[in-house]
Image (tube, helix red, strand yellow):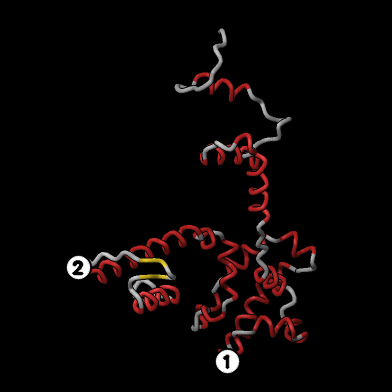
Amino acid sequence: MLTTEAGKHLQHFIDEMTEDPSSYHGHQVKRVDRENEEEEFASSRSDVITKLLKHIERRFASLKQDLIHAATSILDTSQWPSAKEELATYANTSVDYTCRHFRDIIIKQGCNLEEVMYEWQEAKLFIGDLPPARRHTVWRDIFNDPELAAKFPNFMHIVEVLLVLPLSTAACERGFSCMKQVKTDWRASLTVEMLTKLMFIVLNGPAPTDFRAAGAVKAWWKAAERTRRPDYME
């Protein structure tokens, strides 16, 4: 919608500039009158929003490609097929993959894997006959109703796993700590490219005790461009 309509913040800016085109928040604004100004702005806005959407889709593409993340969509009952023939085979592969992926965890919790697929079929029949309003909260209702939960004791282990995605910022926090260790006051002139490489080595490389420098030194020695290389004798 933002490609054709102004959002809340842009509309607020437009309203303020309409009242007083010469200033914005006390700052003088130099405006250049141009032909087709509104058309150019609309075109630029559409271009920016379109590119932004493409970047966002590319950034989170892995959520669709990852089979576990894709399996979480089966809990959205509004997306289930209405035809019973299609519903009978719907998401069977996703449930089977989830069972195999979390096999050790759910078995430890008392889940009988042989019963999961049977209960999944029963759950689809049960939920498919519910009114649309009840489908929206069906998983919460099943968890809160002991009698309903007893109908699908094994499949509910799968539901519980898919409802809880363990998101964490631990990797980001480790990255910030690593950056502070690598880029100290004495190394403030490191470029972004070099800093990225050094951080990658620290975070993903071998431990210092396991690192063998001979290969790196040999590659550096044979490199076409070298800086600050001491004049070692062969």
Please identify the quarter of the rendering in which residue 138 is found: bottom right
**Coordinates of residue 217 in the picture (x, y in percent):** 58, 22
Determine whether the residue tagged by mark 2 lies in a helix, strand or loop.
loop
User: Mark 2 Cα within 10 Å, few/some/many (few <14, many 20+)?
Assistant: few
Report the number of discs: 2
Apparent side of residue 136 relative to residue 54 in the rendered image (left or right): right
The front one of 183 and 28 is 28
Could you tell me which residue is drawn at 79 percent across and 66 percent down? 109
**Coordinates of residue 88 in the picture (x, y in percent):** 55, 77
Check disc 1 and report the residue beneath it: 131
In the rendered structure, find residue 35 and report the number of the disc placed on it.
Answer: 2
Determine whether the residue tagged by mark 1 lies in a helix, strand or loop.
loop
Could you tell me which residue is drawn at 66 percent across and 26 percent down? 212
Residue type (three-letter) at the residue carrying disc 2: Glu
**Coordinates of residue 59 in the picture (x, y in percent):** 49, 58
Apparent side of residue 40 relative to residue 119 in the rendered image (left or right): left
